[in-house]
Amino acid sequence: MLHGSITCYFVALGPNSPYSAAKPRSGGSDRPLREGKFREAIPKYQEALKTDPKLVAAQAGLVRAYLKADDVSSAAELAKTSLAAQPASPPLLAAMGTVQYRRGEIPEAEKSFLEARKADPNLVDAYLGLAQLVTHRAALSPCL
């Protein structure tokens, strides 16, 4: 559980990390997402997944694209099925945490982000998710 303040760590992914940005593994389908073209990114990720259905970067990217396009139900369904097939995947755990946060499932989101961080201490998405939870709690603290 997160209590009190949190120290934010900015961790660069090293070239040896299996999830390193230096090794694009989404079939190039992440470009529209990075450019803010969320609806355009969805079919590109789907195409990458037709080529390799277990491509973790494409699965996590598609979850993010669905969320950015406000299609939370599709994001939740994909995160659930992807994580069922690869339960120890840090990017998928972080993606699930983001889905859970968007659905208001705060304790579950925290658990997913912590599991992602434990599995890959260099995964930036896990730290960003945890920071988002801390910000959320700080915003709510005057109400408690």
Image: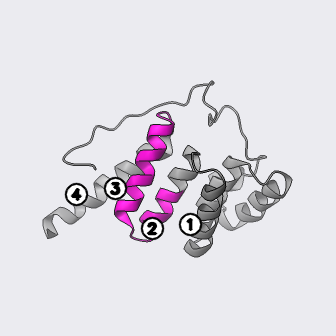
**Above or below, 100 relative to 10:** below
Q: Position of residue 75 (x, y in %)?
A: 60, 67
Alpha carbon separation for disc pair 2 and 3: 11 Å
Alpha-carbon distance for marks 4 and 3? 9 Å
- The dot on residue 138 is 4
Query: Taking 94 as reference, is 65 above or below it?
Result: below
- Residue name at image x 21 percent, y 44 percent: 5
Q: Earlier in the sequence, mark 2 or mark 1?
A: 1
| Amino acid type of the residue tagged 3 in the rendering | Leu
Label 1: how many Cα within 10 Å (few below 14, some 14–19, many 20+):
many
Q: What percent of the width, then of the height, locates residue 104?
A: 39, 70
Asked if the residue under mark 1 is in contact with the one under mark 3, i.e. CB atoms within 8 Å, the reply is: no
Counting from the top left corner in percent of width and height, residue 1 is at: 28, 50
Tag 1 residue:
67
The residue wearing badge 2 is 102
Q: Residue 67 colored magenta? A: no
Quadrant of the snapshot with the C terminus: bottom left
Three-letter code for the amino acid on which mark 4 is drawn: Ala
